[in-house]
Image: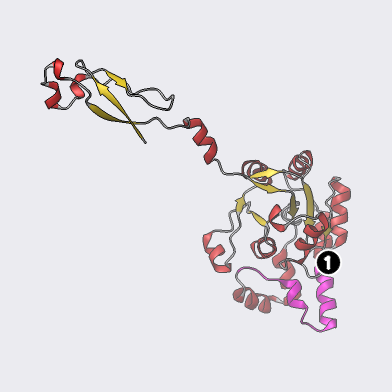
């Protein structure tokens, strides 16, 4: 869009008639006139048109506000327990070796560099073998409950979610007894709180979809937070939820994401970082 102005003998300009109320063009100094006009006698200056860009109808601040992306609504956060809401205390490698034996552990570990899914693995065993394996697993988990510690930042993050009236859920492959102990010892309750008694368990999306249904929310209004790429992130992705990988020690990189074809929406080194990413990226509405 353009408007015209006329130049008089000294180079000043007058806006021509226009139907809008936008300010006229700024004065044009003589030195900026084309040479043939500079040399002309002043009485020959009549209506010499010059083109000026028309001011934009919207102020810059208005354009900036229009360009801001609308935040996605988030109505609930679902947490893993061991290694996410609690400090990692279970020695899973020793557990797997005790269940599988040293040789078999090494073979399966080599075939599954992303990690061993011991619960799914023993499902194909005979009832007697399963019973023995479950006894070993329960012994390690019992030892873990005796050393149970809350993860730094967990209480503060849950308090923040409560202040925003954002729902909190929990999905763990540990037993219900461990969940009950967490609720009792730290007085932080998650609902629903699904342990491995709920089948199928992670990485199947069923437990997360169950929580969404209980809350009457859509999966894309929920975030899954956990420390396992193959269990927590896989569960969240398959359900259609946002995912956040808690990676305290920097174990995971782009190569791991490519290998498993799983990439979390967010990766943090502490639960304190979850607080800030939620406020930055989401519209927190119950």
The quarter of the rendered structure image containing the N terminus is top left
**Residue 94 left/right relative to 35:** right
x then y, percent, for residue 55: 40, 30
Residue 58 visible here: yes
Establish if 13 lies above or below 65: above
Residue 223 visible here: no
Residue at 29% across / 25% down in the picture?
Answer: 5
For the residue pair 14 and 61, the one nearer the viewer reads as: 14
x then y, percent, for residue 43: 15, 15
Question: What is the magenta segment's predominant secondary structure?
Answer: helix
The residue range painted magenta reads: 114-139
For the residue pair 251 and 188, the one nearer the viewer reads as: 188
**Residue 232 left/right relative to 159:** left
Total numbered badges shown on the rendered structure:
1
Q: How is the image coloured?
A: secondary structure
**Residue 245 left/right relative to 174:** left
Snapshot quadrant of residue 278: top right
Residue at 42% across / 32% down in the picture?
Answer: 56
* Residue 137 counted in the magenta span: yes
Label 1 residue SS: loop
For the residue pair 166 and 110, the one nearer the viewer reads as: 166
Label 1, on which residue? 198
For the residue pair 81 and 103, the one nearer the viewer reads as: 81
Residue occupying the far bottom of the picture: 126
Snapshot quadrant of residue 242: bottom right
**Residue 247 left/right relative to 92:** left
């Amino acid at each position: 869009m353009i408007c015209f102005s006329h130049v008089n003998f000294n180079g000043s300009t007058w806006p021509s008639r226009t139907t809008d109320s936008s300010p006229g063009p700024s004065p044009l100094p003589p030195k900026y006139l084309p040479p043939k006009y500079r040399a002309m006698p002043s009485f020959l200056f009549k209506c010499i048109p010059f083109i000026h860009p028309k001011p934009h109808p919207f102020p810059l601040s208005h354009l900036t506000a229009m360009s801001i992306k609308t935040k996605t609504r988030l109505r609930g956060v679902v947490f893993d327990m061991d290694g996410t809401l609690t400090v990692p205390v279970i020695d899973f490698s020793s557990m797997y070796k005790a269940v599988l034996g040293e040789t078999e552990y090494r073979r399966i570990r080599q075939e599954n560099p992303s990690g061993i899914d011991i619960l799914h693995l023993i499902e194909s065993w005979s009832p007697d073998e399963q019973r023995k394996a479950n006894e070993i697993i329960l012994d390690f988990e019992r030892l873990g409950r005796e050393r149970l510690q809350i993860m730094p930042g967990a209480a503060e993050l849950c308090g923040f979610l409560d202040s925003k009236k954002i729902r909190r859920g929990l999905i763990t492959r540990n037993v219900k007894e461990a969940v009950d102990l967490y609720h009792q010892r730290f007085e932080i309750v998650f609902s629903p709180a699904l342990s491995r008694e709920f089948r199928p368990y992670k990485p199947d999306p069923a437990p997360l979809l169950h929580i969404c249904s209980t809350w009457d929310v859509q999966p894309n209004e929920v975030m899954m937070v956990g420390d396992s790429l193959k269990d927590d992130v896989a569960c969240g992705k398959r359900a259609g939820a946002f995912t956040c990988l808690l990676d305290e020690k920097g174990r995971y990189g782009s190569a791991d994401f490519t290998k498993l074809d799983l990439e979390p929406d967010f990766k943090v080194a502490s639960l304190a970082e979850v607080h800030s990413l939620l406020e930055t990226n989401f519209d927190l509405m119950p």
